[in-house]
Amino acid sequence: MAAEVLTVVCAWCQRIIARAPAGARVTHTICQSCLDRTAQLGDGETDPMVLNPPPDYFGDAFKH
């Protein structure tokens, strides 16, 4: 059985990590830049604002 090719998308910022052919299913991971943001959480003094999604995360959904 052949392995299925999936499009891989960052679950935090929605960046495409690996593109598959059109119509392929999608799976999620975390990209390196989002992972780097979470690495700051272990120091105990991190500003919780670093956990906010990037400004364009929701696209135009909340713009009037």
Image (cartoon, helix red, strand yellow):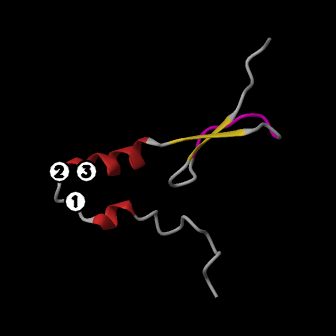
* SS at circle 2: helix
Taking the spot 41% from the left edge, 49% from the top edge, the residue there is: 34
- As drawn, the label of residue 43 is 2
Q: Judge the density around disc 3: few (<14), some (14-19), many (≥20) Cα neighbours within 10 Å.
A: some
Residue 12, given in percent of the width and then of the height, sits at 50, 53
Q: What range is drawn magenta here?
A: 16-22
The type of residue carrying mark 1 is: Thr
The quarter of the displayed image where residue 50 is located: bottom left
Residue 55 part of the magenta-drawn span:
no
- As drawn, the label of residue 40 is 3
Above or below — where is 56 with respect to 6?
below
**Residue on which the image places disc 1:** 46
Taking the spot 41% from the left edge, 65% from the top edge, the residue there is: 52
Taking the spot 41% from the left edge, 41% from the top edge, the residue there is: 32
Distance, label 1 to label 3, CA atoms, is 6 Å
* SS at circle 1: loop
